Image (spheres, rainbow, N blue to C red):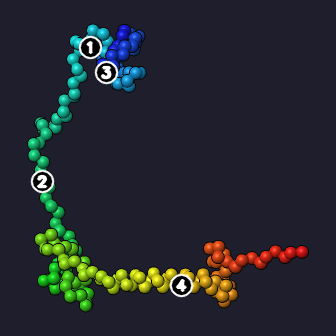
Amino acid sequence: MIIECPRCTSRYEVADGLIGPAGKSVRCAKCSNVWLARPVGEADTAPPPQWPEAPQRAGGSFPTEIPVTPEPPEDPALAEFRDAQRPESGGSGMAGKKEGGGFARFPDPSEPPPPPRPRLGGAATIGWAVTVILLGAGAWAAYSWRDAVMEAWPPSQRVYLALGLGADPPPPASR
């Protein structure tokens, strides 16, 4: 029997017994297309396979509406938590807290957002600049006076050696 790829029209000779009456899924060696090959003469007369019927309930067909499940009762601890968040309830809260008790207050979508925090502006920039200058000055001093630091604090020799800044080894003795 000869089968033909529907995509690239390549033809293949297949033994008659390999493809049964229901057909067989085959792949084209040329274009890799996969299709259902059927025996000659039955391709036109055989009806396409049908899907099985939908399963039926014991009492008839499936319901058209899904029943609504009742909501479970609210947990008393959750109700207490919500009450403690409301500023008008006073809440038991911690001492020193002005509103909302000691719990975090979640934002309410109907409330306007809180105003943005004020920017620190120049104070933060000056603080960062002073910090960078002090760190740089400390690094420069540790490098410049490394011999004095290693002499005063011998464990620092390992740090300087690890950084490649240790004392130079003495020159070899000449003869």
Answer above or below: position of 146 versus 7: below
Give me the C-alpha separation between circle 1 and circle 4.
Answer: 89 Å
Q: Give the residue number, with chain letter if any, for mark 4.
A: 138
In-image side of 10 versus 82 (left or right): right
Secondary element type, mark 4: helix
Q: Which residue is mark 2?
A: 68
Q: Residues within 10 Å of mark 4 (few under 14, many from 20)?
A: few
Residue type (three-letter) at the residue carrying disc 3 = Arg
Q: CA distance from mark 3 to mark 1?
A: 17 Å
Comparing marks 3 and 1, which lies closer to the viewer?
3
Which dot, 1 or 2, sits closer to the camera?
1
Q: Is the C-beta separation of discs 2 and 3 under 8 Å?
A: no
Q: Quadrant of residue 27?
A: top left
Q: Nearer the viewer, mark 1 or mark 4?
A: 4
| Element carrying mark 1 | helix
Between 60 and 175, the one lying in front of the other is 175
Q: Nearer the N terminus, badge 4 or badge 3?
A: 3
The amino acid sitting under disc 4 is Gly
Q: Are marks 1 and 4 in contact (CB under 8 Å)?
A: no
Asked if the residues shown at circle 1 and circle 2 are in contact, with their CB atoms under 8 angstroms apart, the answer is: no
Query: Which quadrant of the view contains residue 140?
Result: bottom right
Q: Residue 113 appears at what percent x and percent y?
A: 17, 74
Is residue 99 found left or right of 121 in the rendered image?
Answer: left
Residue position for label 1 = 43
Q: Nearer the viewer, residue 167 or 41?
A: 167
Marks counted in the figure total 4
- In-front residue for pair 65/122: 122
For marks 4 and 3, give the CA distance: 76 Å
Q: Residue at x 25, y 90 (%)?
A: 95
Q: Which residue is mark 3?
A: 7
Q: Which tag, 2 or 4, sits closer to the chain's start?
A: 2
